[in-house]
Amino acid sequence: MGVPRRVLKLGGSVLTCKSVPYCLDVAVTRQCLSELRDFSQGLVLVHGGGSFGHYEASKRAPTRIQLTAVSMQELNAYIMREISVLGIRAFPIPGRYFNMEHLERVIELGYMPVIYGDVRENGEIVSGDDLTIAIAKKYSLTALFATDVDGVIVNGKVVYELDRLEDFVGLEHDSYDVTGGMAEKLRKIFTANVNSLVFNGKRKGNIFNALKGERIGTLIKVRE
Ligand SMILES: Nc1ncnc2c1ncn2[C@@H]1O[C@H](COP(=O)(O)OP(=O)(O)OP(=O)(O)O)[C@@H](O)[C@H]1O
Ligand SMILES: C=C(C)CCOP(=O)(O)O
């Protein structure tokens, strides 16, 4: 069975304009995907919901669950098409169907798995953050989180390293978010005890450098 060598979550804050419903940033998405091309073997790509899934999930409509699922399929379809244009062999895995055995089988067959945040039929949201952290934990990897900020900001500055959740203070934001944004991401990272890197995926070269192993943004250091 195939074993993941890297796991990267492309956040919805990178791929979409998070405060505008169904707004994909096509140029940034292409740039990000082109930077991961050289690493696609053994890479597990996860993407978040941004103004697709989070927008639908935050509404009170009776059709909320189905539209949340479909909005994520739509975002994933854009991403899969762009990946295909780059000639990368990849296969989509909706978050609600994710399991480690399937992941390994997809890698074994020579594909880059593209997993995405999702919703179950009972309305439970499946966060891409949880999946990323679970994969990093199982395969002892550093979880790479590409977001729209240069790292974790404490007292107005991006910190080089964060080793205590207590140092984090959430900033105000006006985007749709049903999975708790940065605060929840960090809480989950510390709970799972998984070293993680939070960096700006919108800056050219950052995804390439993070995948190469360079230390950029903020390292969430939970263990040696
Ligand atoms: N102290 C902080 N430091 C850095 N970012 C913060 C802080 N507090 C809040 N944030 C917010 O966290 C956001 C990034 O986290 P978020 O989880 O929303 O991103 P994402 O993973 O890209 O989103 P998605 O869930 O759509 O995939 C930033 O846009 C920023 O506004
Ligand atoms: C909102 C939905 C459906 C997906 C949430 O995934 P995330 O953006 O990774 O937290």
Image (cartoon, helix red, strand yellow):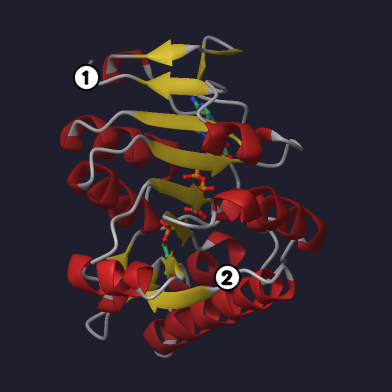
Find out if the beta carbon at label 2 lies less than 8 Å from the nearest ligand 2 atom.
Answer: yes
Image location (x, y in percent) of residue 92: 46, 77
Quarter placement of the C terminus: top left
The residue to which callout 1 is attached is 223
CA distance separating discs 2 and 1:
34 Å
- Residue that badge 2 annotates: 52
Amino acid type shown at disc 2: Phe
> Which one is nearer the viewer's eye here, 52 or 202?
202
Is residue 114 found left or right of 118 in the rendered image? right
Q: Earlier in the sequence, mark 2 or mark 1?
A: 2
Q: Which mark is residue 119?
A: none
- Identified at 72% across, 55% down, the residue is 34
Tell me residue 96's x, y (percent): 29, 76
Depth-wise, is mark 2 or mark 1 nearer the camera? 1
Q: Residue 175, can we see it?
A: no
| Residue at x 49% of width, y 59% of height | 48
Q: What type is the residue that disc 1 sits on?
A: Arg
Q: Residue at x 28, y 44 (%)?
A: 136
- Residue 214 shows up from this direction: yes
Q: Nearer the viewer, residue 115 or 61?
A: 115
Label tally: 2
- Report the residue at 62% width, 51% height from top: 38
Q: Secondary structure at mark 1?
A: loop
Q: What percent of the width, then of the height, locates residue 131?
A: 30, 56
Task: Establish if 17 lies above or below 186.
Answer: below
Q: Residues within 10 Å of mark 2 (few under 14, many from 20)?
A: many
> In the figure, 115 relative to 72: above or below?
above
Q: Is 104 on the left or on the right of 110, as rendered?
A: left
Circle 1: is it few (<14), some (14-19), or many (20+) Cα within 10 Å? few
x and y, in percent, of residue 24 in the image: 72, 65
Give the image quarter of residue 195.
top left
Does residue 147 appear to the left or right of 139 in the view shown? right
